[in-house]
Amino acid sequence: MISIDAFSPILGHVFSHPLIGSYGLPHSDSTFGPEVQWLWDLWFWVSVFFTVLITGLAVFFCIKYRFRKGIREVADPSTDHNTALEITWSVIPLIIMMVMFVLGFKDYMNMQTPPSGCYNIGVQAWQWHWQFTYPDGAATNTLYMPVNTPVKFSMTSKDVLHGFWIPQFSVQRDVVPGRTMTVWVKAVHTGHFVLQCSEYCGDGHSEMRANVDVMPIPAFKKKLAQASDIWIHDGKILPLSVVGKKIAALEGCLGCHSVNGATGTGPTWKDLAGSHVKLASGQTVVADYAYLRQAILYPGHKMVAGFNNVMPNYYTTFGGAAHKKHRKLDAIIWYINTLSSHANKASRPPVPDYPGKPAAPRSASPKKIAAAAPKLPAAAAALALVAEGKRFYASMGCIGCHTVNGSPGVGPTWKNLAGSHVKLTNGKTVVADYKYLRFMILYPGKKVVAGFQPIMPSYTDTLAGAKNKKKLDSLIWYINSLSDKASASAEPPLK
């Protein structure tokens, strides 16, 4: 039996002929290129052949058998069908499609099965940014790859469906929230390329791009060594404000918050620190250190007037107990202060910007500022659960019925739900404490909120029981983070 692989060099040579050429695909700089290119060309020219054949025959018959007065005005009788002809035009396309399927499936499996010894790079996607994490802990927004080395990408999304697509590498893979998707590629040439999102993911989809730099292995190692520690450059410790600018770019903050006063998805950082900020609730607050810290850790708690609650909650990791996580948060706030003409002692972090320099005196101590801030879940465990709850909110489909910005939906909004008074269809009014929120998620049809239909499915199979308690509590922690009325009675226990 002749292997299909035997035809690959022949067809590749035929389709590379200048008179035939390739259409629609860019030149590929990966080992997948030749396979994808000649298979694409095969499909293209088979389609061209049958398009010309069928259209040509149709035009020929239209002309040859057109109506002409006095000539064959009465059609000749014909049989109902021609068995041989029908079998022919059914079997031939079937054979062609089966050949195409086998060839395509072979290349697909090759792309999905990374060889042993791959260099592993983690990929995180979110609206509308890419972040790449390397085995040594370095994280970048530009994808750096060693040339002539197979690289495996382990990809996940923090919010919605995205698409990992590098056209010049002939590789594309969906990035699905709640799952780890993998793909691999081996770049054969050094150079600069572009990674694009291939799935429509919201307003900023067209701008969800990242640079891809393929470089020799020594240069690649040097680049990662520079990126592995954001706190140091050329052996010197950087000011926190400089590090904050790096983190803001790395975490995608600058994709939503401008630094020049321009309107964006989120409020501009220009002249923000120390200014007066009007909230959606009608209140006006001062953007001091406590406010800026809260706005980053709990973006849905106090919404700025004129903006929607679209900022993700995963920045809660900056509030953990680890020293560097605290420094990351303070670094961002220092950077925001450098952009503002209103910055003052109260808006700056309690730690010095420059290494070795004492902190500037403040109008209020950090303890007093922290005491004045709303009582929110401060433990690192709670912060992690809030972020986890937002992921479940998207992956479990809650996002389709329950809004988080107060707008109407199929189900009650989660904005200001926790700790509020809720009116039920039976006329009773109950407090949305932890017990109520837990009951409503597990048994949604037994207590129905006034004005809504009992159409929410039961989640007892996936959320009930001791093994699912953490998942259920994380959802309730997320609901609490969205409410100005949240209290200790609405928060899940941390033990």
Image (tube, rainbow, N blue to C red):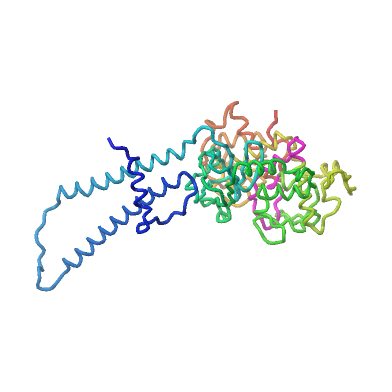
Q: Is residue 58 above or below residue 443?
A: below
Give x and y (percent) for residue 134: 62, 39
Label the magenta part by its dominant secondary structure.
loop
Where does the C terminus fall, quadrant-wise? top right
Give x and y (percent) for residue 353: 82, 47
Decide which of 93, 119 is in the foreground and name it.
119
Where does the N terminus fall, quadrant-wise? top left
Give x and y (percent) for residue 197: 53, 50
In the rendered structure, the answer to whether residue 28 lies left or right of residue 47 reads right
* Stretch of the chain drawn in magenta: 298-326
Give x and y (percent) for residue 145: 58, 44
Decide which of 261, 52 is in the foreground and name it.
52
Q: Is residue 306 magenta?
A: yes
Give the image quarter of residue 473.
top right
Decide which of 66, 47 is in the foreground and name it.
47
Q: Which residue is drawn at 61% across and 30% down?
A: 469
Q: Is residue 324 magenta?
A: yes
In the rendered structure, the answer to whether residue 450 lies left or right of residue 373 reads left
Q: Of all residues shown, which one is farthest toward the top?
A: 466
User: Could you tell me if residue 88 is visible in this image?
Assistant: yes
Give the image quarter of residue 100.
top left
